[in-house]
Amino acid sequence: MTSGRLVLLLLLLLPSAASPVVADDVSWVWPLDPRPAVVRAYEEPAGPYAAGHRGLDVAGSAGAPVRAVDDGVVAFAGRVAGVEVVSVDHGGVRSTYQPVGALVRSGDAVRRGAILGRLLLAGSHCHPRACLHLGRRHGTAYADPLALLDRAAAVRLVTPYGPPPVPPPDPAPVLGGPGSLAPPVDGPVSSPFGMRVHPVTGQLGLHDGTDFAVPCGTPVRSAADGRVVGVDYDPVYGNRVVVDHGGGLTTRYNHLTRADVATGDRVGVGDVVGAVGSTGLSTGCHLHFMVLDGDRPVDPMGLL
Ligand SMILES: [Zn+2]
Ligand SMILES: [Zn+2]
């Protein structure tokens, strides 16, 4: 049994999540020719802020033509945080292709199977090899592209977290009030916490932190005493540092050029944990500062 068949079988065996919102006659054609091998499957995120793999990676060679999976209109074609991306709207369902050097422009109508661009190596999820990351979105919910590519009798639509999140109310009193955290950088707020239309995807969603506009390289300081519990790289948040302050309160410092601490380090308020950068899904140097109450993001400005 091939791994592709195995994945399909597993999908068919899993219980259906929510009711399908795509018509039974909707299917996608493979974006690469001949039908590519799946290198990495879709991994359902546990929540809107959790890790996961919000798409399907399929093997390809650099320069290969990348084709539209269905009729649609190009919603975006361009560079996002250094990676070339094409996104096509199919009327409620959106397909996203990266890294792809676009041969189409935003607003172009495309037919199923039409060439959108050419597969690139830079930005590959399979570095140092080339592969295409294909994403599928229904509104703000990600779903498994494979279910539409390998459309069989049974259809499973993954709706990992349902309707768009509503911004949480003010932080719980246990977190303290204004002034209980120190500002991690000294700079103006360029994008506040709350619901916004994503600058790249055009989807309404929760901006789960506060953006501070400060130059790359600016020292980033811990907002309170605590212990470093995470130093990692995330495709969206880039290089990030997570500090646990006890009582369920953690802070996260995202898009860093580099981290200056290691997991397990103790930090005091004002200690440097890293330097401002533009790594991950970012369009310029800034700090995306997050405060979490348990695993729930809260508005940092209520605590600064
Ligand atoms: Zn991927
Ligand atoms: Zn942000």
Image (cartoon, rainbow, N blue to C red):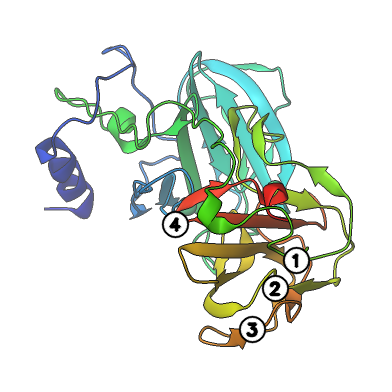
- Does the residue at mark 1 contact the one at mark 2 (Cβ under 8 Å)? yes
Numbered disc total: 4
The residue lying toward the viewer, choosing from 241 and 185, is 185
Identify the residue shown where x is 52% and y is 48%: 172
- Using residue 237 as the reference point, say whether residue 43 is left or right of it: left
The residue lying toward the viewer, choosing from 227 and 278, is 227
Report if the beta carbon of the residue with label 2 is closer than 8 angstroms to ligand 2.
Answer: no
Return the residue at label 2. Answer: 222
Q: Quadrant of residue 221?
A: bottom right
- Using residue 228 as the reference point, say whether residue 274 is left or right of it: right
Dot 1 or dot 2: first in sequence order is 1
Return the residue at label 4. Answer: 294
- Does the residue at mark 3 contact the one at mark 2 (Cβ under 8 Å)? yes
Residue 38, given in percent of the width and then of the height, sits at 34, 51
Report if the beta carbon of the residue with label 3 is closer than 8 angstroms to ligand 2.
Answer: no
- Does the residue at mark 1 contact the one at mark 4 (Cβ under 8 Å)? no
Distance (Cα) linking label 3 and label 2: 7 Å
For the residue marked with disc 2, what is the amino acid?
Ser
Distance (Cα) linking label 4 and label 2: 18 Å
Distance (Cα) linking label 1 and label 3: 13 Å
Residue 250, given in percent of the width and then of the height, sits at 54, 64
